[in-house]
């Protein structure tokens, strides 16, 4: 059995949207597995610094960097800064996301554009920034967080579901383009997970989603983070272009 405390020893990672929820858990789990981790955040600086403290408590390097992931140039700058501080880069986890829900007949252009800018363009920005680096060094792991709603659609989430579906297409294309360079690209699709976003759901909607699961339970951010850790490690060296659901059987 692999020792997860050493699974990512000597590796360096970026986690976008790493200050809260699933992103924070991913950053902590990667750090506990031995990776140096740069935590990207947009406005939750206090929370991001706490995540960095937890990472460093595991005996590795942590770094908090502010960036709006929709900014193409800032993504390039951030990747360069992480490489300088850590001496390299091996893992990218794109997780930053927002939701601006509404049915299609009430969806505003502003809500559509906001979600696409963060949830899809933001992923492109960081994948684009690391792609030439990973290609040249002939190694790298890209893990993109999507959603089961990007696979099946969701009432009231045309913009969110479309952005998450786009992430799947992006990931599969990257897997094809970078595969010959021994770079893997995979997506993780959470279902109902205990996050602030889920906490804000109406109780009726939450109960309905919970009823869809075959396990009859909410997932935790750590459930998602553990799958990300596997995909970021050499244990998954022959896995690429996949979408792995972490949903308790919510979408079978």
Image (cartoon, rainbow, N blue to C red):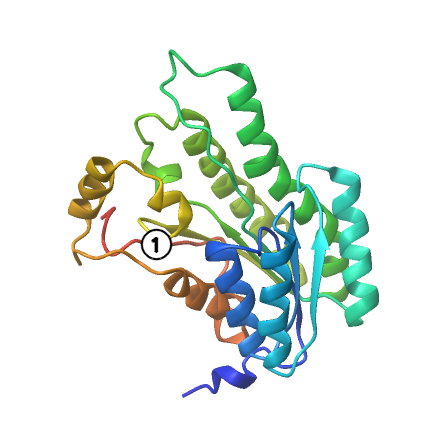
Spot occupied by residue 100 in the image (x, y as percentages of width and height): 46, 29
Residue at the (25%, 56%) spot, across then down: 248
Element type at marker 1?
A: loop
- In the orientation shown, which residue stands out farthest toward the front? 46
Spot occupied by residue 25 in the image (x, y as percentages of width and height): 48, 63
Residue holding disc 1: 194
Q: Is residue 175 left or right of residue 65?
A: left
Q: Is residue 175 left or right of residue 72?
A: left
Q: Is residue 124 above or below residue 112?
A: below
Q: Is residue 28 above or below residue 7?
A: above
Location of residue 36 by image quarter: bottom right
Residue at the (34%, 54%) spot, across then down: 194
Q: Nearer the viewer, residue 19 or 118?
A: 19
Q: Is residue 62 above or below residue 196?
A: below
Location of residue 212 by image quarter: top left
Q: Quadrant of the N terminus?
A: bottom left
Q: Is residue 144 above or below residue 61?
A: above
**Mark 1, other Cα within 10 Å: few <14 / some 14–19 / many ≥20:** some
Q: Is residue 92 visible?
A: no
Spot occupied by residue 137 in the image (x, y as percentages of width and height): 76, 66
């Amino acid at each position: 059995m692999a020792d997860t405390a050493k699974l990512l020893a000597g590796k360096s990672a970026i986690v976008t949207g790493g200050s809260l929820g699933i992103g924070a858990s991913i950053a902590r789990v990667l750090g506990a597995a031995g990776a140096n981790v740069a935590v990207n955040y947009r406005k939750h600086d206090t929370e991001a610094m706490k995540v960095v403290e937890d990472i460093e408590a595991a005996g590795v390097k942590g770094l908090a960097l502010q960036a709006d992931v929709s900014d193409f140039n800032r993504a390039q700058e951030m990747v360069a800064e992480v490489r300088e501080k850590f001496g390299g880069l091996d893992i990218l986890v794109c997780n930053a996301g927002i939701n601006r829900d509404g049915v299609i007949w009430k969806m505003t252009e502003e809500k559509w554009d906001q979600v696409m800018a963060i949830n899809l363009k933001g992923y492109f920005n960081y994948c684009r920034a690391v792609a030439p680096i990973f290609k040249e060094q002939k190694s790298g792991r890209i893990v993109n967080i999507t959603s089961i709603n990007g696979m099946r659609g969701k009432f009231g989430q045309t913009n969110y579901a479309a952005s998450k579906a786009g992430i799947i297409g992006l990931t599969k294309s990257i897997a094809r383009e970078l595969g010959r360079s021994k770079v893997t690209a995979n997506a993780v699709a959470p279902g109902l997970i205990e996050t602030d976003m889920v906490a804000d759901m109406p109780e009726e909607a939450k109960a309905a989603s919970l009823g869809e699961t075959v396990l009859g339970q909410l997932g935790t951010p750590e459930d998602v983070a553990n799958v990300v850790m596997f995909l970021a490690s050499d244990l998954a060296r022959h896995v690429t272009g996949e979408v792995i659901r972490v949903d308790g059987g919510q979408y079978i």
